[in-house]
Amino acid sequence: MAHNVVVMGVSGVGKTTVARLLSERLALPYGEADDFHPPANIAKMAAGTPLDDADRQPWLEAIGAWLQRQNDAGVGGVVTCSALKRRYRDTLRAACPDIWFLHLAGPHDLVADRIGHRTGHFMPPSLLDSQYSTLEPLGADERGAVLDVGPAPEELVDAAVRLLTTP
């Protein structure tokens, strides 16, 4: 069975690092959510303005379409996506129903510190509060798991692989 994994969470939790490592470990294609944003979304976030649901919809549909193509090809894939609200995850599931969500979660102070030290990213630290207030945890009926981002990325990947491959 092809694995279709969305590595989700607020900005700064390590989605890109963990997703890249996970895709390598599972030998699956990797998709970076930021690459699916239209230029207007990036400009809006870079200016410190949170995206609204209308901004996010085409982005979510593009990510869902990528997952569906990977699934239809029988290979699966690993993609990053904040997927903060249930309805955003529903949009992704509508395109690729067997998605498994890996929610990377951590305390606000730790994540804010990480964001404050990274360079070359359009997401300003000022938007972190809006992401935490928007975040809706995975529901009991949603396939996936929550991992605390305290351990090293390699340890998170080891845990994710165990969760994905254990019946």
Image (cartoon, rainbow, N blue to C red):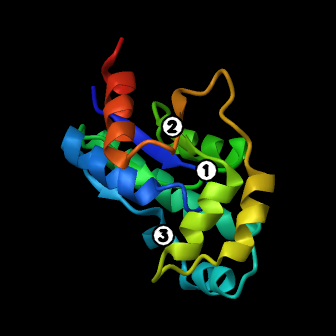
Towards the viewer: 120 or 117: 117
- Distance Cα–Cα, label 3 vs label 1: 12 Å
Amino acid at circle 1: Ala
Identify which residue is drawn at 24% across, 37% down: 74
Answer with the quarter of the image where residue 46 lies. bottom right
Dot 1: few (<14), some (14–19), or many (≥20) neighbours within 10 Å? many
- Distance Cα–Cα, label 2 vs label 3: 17 Å
Identify which residue is drawn at 59% across, 50% down: 9
Amino acid at circle 2: Phe
Answer with the quarter of the image where residue 133 lies. bottom right
Q: Position of residue 86 (x, y in %)?
A: 70, 41
Task: Check the image and report above or below for 5 versus 45.
Answer: above
Residue underneath mark 2: 101
Label located before the other in sequence (3 or 1): 3
Label located before the other in sequence (2 or 3): 3
Horizontal placement of 133 versus 86: left or right?
right
Q: For numbered disc 2, what is the local secondary structure?
A: strand
**Badge number at residue 51:** none
- Distance Cα–Cα, label 2 vs label 1: 9 Å
Amino acid at circle 3: Asp
Residue underneath mark 3: 34
| Dots 2, 3 in contact, CB < 8 A | no
Horizontal placement of 87 versus 99: left or right?
right
Horizontal placement of 165 versus 85: left or right?
left
Answer with the quarter of the image where residue 138 lies. top right
Label located before the other in sequence (2 or 1): 1
Task: Check the image and report above or below for 69 versus 137.
Answer: below
Q: Position of residue 68 (x, y in %)?
A: 40, 46
Q: For numbered disc 3, what is the local secondary structure?
A: helix
Identify which residue is drawn at 40% across, 48% down: 67
**Badge number at residue 83:** 1
Residue 16 visible in this rendered orientation of the protein:
yes
